[in-house]
């Protein structure tokens, strides 16, 4: 059993498949997507989109209360640890009008979607390339085996290379890159969904600014 495990974990076929598939994915998606794909492994296990959605909902009530009492210029004083929400509050408080804020936040969400799509495309490209590189390794192993039929001692290593590259290509595609791409796609959809709701609510709050200011002015005059 240990001998079989040792053959499966042999570094040569693993490196052949990993490097080959990685270079193909890099050529298809680019360096930015590759660096983002490496960084995406952290939120892959740490992201909690449902918790972030619930926190955003609670925060919106505070933002609305501040806007009604003190105006939009004070909304950036609402404290939050989420970088997107913090930036949105700062932009809301400093925007010259609602259209400026609406354009900014929708453009930010579009940029976020595009960035997520690039990263997911890298993992999908890696999953697609894995079996192809594994098959290429199989062909190389078979060529080496047939080219050295006169030397029985070399047949075993070349046959092992042929079989192991196929195996590792399938593992890379179906047990690593493919599941990561699917998980990131699901997280992206959930994240963008609650952020779009947040954006729409903040735009609605901004559109009520004139009525809010009149209410505050009337209250102060009384």
Image (cartoon, rainbow, N blue to C red):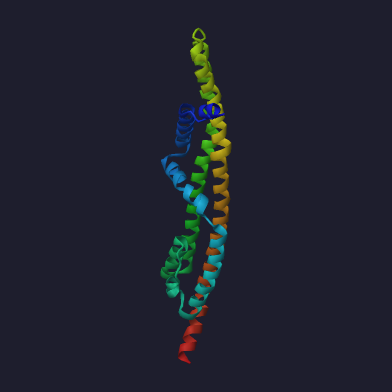
Q: Of residues 73 and 48, which is closer to you in this image?
A: 48
Query: Furthest residue to the top?
Result: 150
- Whether 91 is drawn above or below 125: the answer is below
| Residue found 48% across the figure and 47% down from its top | 41
Q: Position of residue 56 (x, y in %)?
A: 53, 66
Whether residue 195 is visible to the viewer of this picture, yes or no, is yes
Q: Is 89 positioned to the left or the right of 132 in the image?
A: left
Q: Position of residue 170 (x, y in %)?
A: 57, 32
Q: Looking at the figure, which quarter contains the N terminus?
A: top right
Q: Is residue 129 above or below residue 114?
A: above
Q: Residue furthest bottom?
A: 222
How many marks overall? 0
| Quadrant of the rendered image containing residue 138 | top right
* Residue ID at (51%, 49%): 44
Q: Is residue 131 visible?
A: no
In the rendering, at what x and y percent does residue 187 appear?
A: 55, 52
Residue at coordinates 48% horizontally, 68% vertically from top-left?
Answer: 98
Horizontally, residue 93 falls left or right of residue 205, namely left
55 versus 12 height, above or below: below
Of 114 and 221, nearer the camera is 114
Q: Residue at x 47, y 28 (%)?
A: 16
**Coordinates of residue 139 in the picture (x, y in percent):** 53, 20
Q: Nearer the viewer, residue 203 or 123?
A: 123
């Amino acid at each position: 059993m240990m001998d079989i495990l040792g053959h499966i974990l042999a570094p040569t076929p693993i490196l052949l498949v990993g490097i080959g598939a990685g270079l193909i994915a890099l050529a298809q998606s680019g360096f930015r997507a590759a660096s983002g794909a490496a960084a995406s492994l952290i939120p892959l296990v740490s992201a909690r989109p449902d918790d972030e959605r619930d926190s955003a909902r609670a925060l919106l009530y505070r933002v609305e209360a501040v806007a009604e009492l003190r105006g939009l210029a004070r909304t950036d004083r609402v404290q939050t640890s989420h970088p997107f929400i913090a930036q949105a509050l700062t932009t809301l408080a400093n925007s010259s009008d609602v259209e400026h804020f609406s354009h900014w936040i929708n453009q930010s969400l579009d940029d976020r979607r595009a960035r997520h799509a690039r990263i997911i495309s890298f993992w999908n490209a890696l999953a697609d390339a894995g079996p192809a590189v594994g098959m290429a390794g199989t062909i190389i192993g078979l060529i080496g085996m047939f080219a050295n039929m006169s030397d029985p001692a070399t047949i075993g290593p070349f046959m092992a290379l042929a079989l192991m590259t196929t195996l590792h290509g399938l593992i890379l595609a179906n047990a690593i890159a493919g599941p990561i791409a699917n998980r990131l796609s699901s997280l992206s959809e959930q994240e963008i969904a609650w952020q779009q709701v947040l954006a729409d609510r903040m735009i609605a709050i901004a559109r009520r600014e004139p009525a809010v200011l009149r209410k505050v002015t009337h209250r102060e005059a009384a």
